[in-house]
Structure formats: C-alpha cells, structure tokens
Amino acid sequence: MKFFFHFWRKIFLSAALPPFAHAHCLQQLRGYTAGRYFLFPLIFLTVFPLFSQDSSELPFTGEEPPSAEALFITRESLPRIGNPKFVSPRTAKSDEEREIISRENGIWQQYQKDMESYRKIKNLPSNFPPEKIRDKPASLFYTYKVVSDKEKYLDTFHGLYARFQTGQGSLATINRISSPEDLHAGMELILPVPQGLFIPKKAESALEILLQKEYAPFITEKTTVYDIDGQEFYFLPDRTFSPTQIAFFHDKGMQLPLSKKIITSEFGYRTSPVSGTWKFHAGIDLAAPIGSEVYACKSGIVITAEQNHPLYGKYIDIKHNGNTVSRYAHLSKILVSPGQTVTSGEVIGLVGTTGASTGPHLHFEVRENGTPTDPAKQIRKF
C-alpha cells in the first residue's frame, strides 16, 4: 500500500495539465467556476509522469534524443499576467478600467496561489493519499510581457525572478535566456509553476550545450517533453543551476587572453607579414614569449582543438553564449579538448609560432554568428 501511494504521488507531483485543463483554468480566472470540482479528477487522471533520478535506462547523448510524446503548449492558451502586483480597483477612472484591474488582480492572485500550492504539494510526505490533496495548481504556466520599470527592477532578470518567486534556472531555461543581459522590455516570458530545468532538444547557446552535456544521463524515455510553440524541452523537476552553470550565466564581457597586452597587429586590412599582400586580418596579434599561458577570454565550450592547421597551426575555438566564438591560434601546446567546459581566465594553451607565423605571438579572434569582429572592442581590459 505504501508503494502504491508513493507511486501515484510521484506521478501527481510531476503532473502536466493537458490543453483542455488550461482552457478550464482560463475560464476560472474569468470568473467561471461551474464544473470546477468535476474537472479536477479528470485533470488528475490525465497527468503524465516526469523525470525520476532512478530512471536512467536510456542516456541522452545529444545525437539520438530519447523519443517521448510531447505535451503541446501555446503561449496564447496560457493565462497572461498583466501586472505583477495588486492594484486597488478604487484607483480606476472608469468602469472599463476597473474591470481590467479586477481581471489582472485575479490572474496575479491565481499565479501566487498556484505557486504556493505547488510548493505545499512538493513538501507532502511520500505516503500522503493523493485523493486528499485539494489545492492543486489551476495552471502550470503563465506569460508576462516585460515592461520598462527601473524603479522596481521589473525590467531586469534578477528583479523578475525575485518578483515571480521562480528559480533562476527555471526562468532562464524555459525562455532560452543565456545571460541576464538578454532580457529586455517588450520580451514575452513564460513563467513556469513547476520548478526545474527545461533542457532544449536542440541546443544553441554554450549554456544550453553545457546543460545537455551535464544532464544527459538523467534524460530518458520517461522524461516529460514540453512542446512550446514548436520548441521542445526536456523537463527535469527540482533541478537548479550548478555553480558552473551560474558562472556561465553571469559571465559578463571578455577578458584579455594573455597576462600582458602588446598588440603587434590590429583588426582589419593590412599587409600580410607572410605573403606581403594586402589582406583582411580577422583578429588581433598579441606578442608574447613562447610558452606563455593563454587564457579563455570567457566561459564556454571548446568546439575545436586543431593540432596542424596550415594557417593557424595549433588553435582552439571556444563557443560562448550569444553565438559568439573566440579563436586562439599559433599555439605551441593545446591543454583542452573538444567538448570540454572552460571558465573565464582558465589556462587553455601556451603561446607558440605554429602555422603561418613569423614569430612567437597569439592570434586572437572573436566571431559573432560567424562574422569576425574587433576583439579590442569587447575585451574588458583594453
């Protein structure tokens, strides 16, 4: 009997509401309550099990994701929070404005109630009878459009996750935010009531690649998949950002890849010291003795560690958030390997003169979406 209750409790705690339940939630928020207690048993019977740490039969490799039926969600079907605070209807200047305020207050209060209900359910003992659980979330997801609010910081990532009482990892991953600086006024966010990490099937940023890599062993055929407007996510409940992931997320700007700054060749067109022709130089050259340590300019994932390129010699490419890639060329030694996670300032190689080089130096590039940009404009120490 204890196993039976534990089994069904796990299913409920990891529940995802089907589309008709979301529609019902919207009706509730608009004041329609008929049939409310009739639908709750149906909602309970249509829930789906989510991730469990003891279920790792099919590790996710990033190349062959486990197949699982996705739960489809559209932003338009979700309750929309218009104002994340209670406003007195007495401040309204017209009946229409009073009605809008009352409706927005109702949605905001429902969101707060759902968050509290979810927390209480997660804290129930394992043998608590599921049929005695009364306060269940009306909706598992809400939306909110970011507005400019400098006074209360509601247009910043930190201000919003604190206001909505959601975890950094939950808010960042479901909205595919790679850095706090990515958030801006006018951006429409999805606010998840279930707290955890939403791992995209198709990773794009360095942070998403890192998440896929670290949580691959825990993604199985039983892991819940959400399809949100065509983007599929694996949901890992109760997971939060690790220290490494937090470093990725909050890593600002770039640092110098060497301990000293001695630029011998700027970014742009120049006479090539190798061929003597007028050519475009896609990076900057930094002079340094052979064997000098080379540092990662920013946290990222090593995507290339080439040992014998005819032009660059030994070189390293690191993928960062925002589709940015940094390159470190003409090295004498490479100290990292493809797929490795590196943090800002970590030693990745040693200065050399391999490839098409006329002397010891580091050729340093920064590419955004494949296009070379001037590194000197992005590095903090310049």
Image (tube, rainbow, N blue to C red):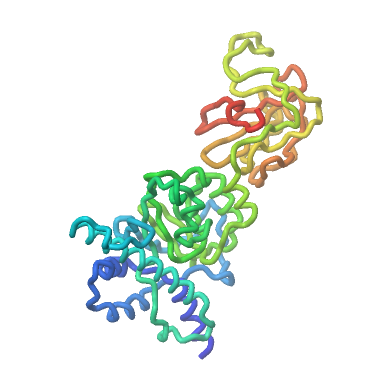
Looking at this rendering, what residue extends furthest in the left direction? Answer: 95
Q: Residue at x 62, y 28 (%)?
A: 365
> Residue 80, position in %: x, y?
32, 58
> Residue 255, position in %: x, y?
66, 35
Q: Residue at x 64, y 52 (%)?
A: 244
> Residue 49, position in %: x, y?
46, 72
The quarter holding residue 287 reads top right
**In the displayed structure, does residue 209 sit left or right of residue 24?**
right
Q: Residue at x 57, y 25 (%)?
A: 374
**In the displayed structure, does residue 77 sit left or right of residue 167?**
left
> Residue 227, position in %: x, y?
39, 57
Q: Residue at x 40, y 70 (%)?
A: 114
Number of labels in the image equals 0
Residue 48 visible in the snapshot:
yes
4 or 258, nearer to the observer: 258
118 or 203, nearer to the observer: 118
Q: Is residue 171 above or below residue 132?
A: above
**In the displayed structure, does residue 25 sit left or right of residue 266?**
left
Q: Is residue 131 above or below residue 77?
A: below
Q: Point out the image quarter for the C terminus.
A: top right
Residue 200 visible in the snapshot:
no
Looking at this rendering, what residue extends furthest in the bottom direction? Answer: 1
**In the displayed structure, does residue 33 sit left or right of residue 309?**
left
The quarter holding residue 366 reads top right
The quarter holding residue 104 reads bottom left
Q: Is residue 59 above or below residue 119?
A: above
Q: Is residue 221 above or below residue 228?
A: below
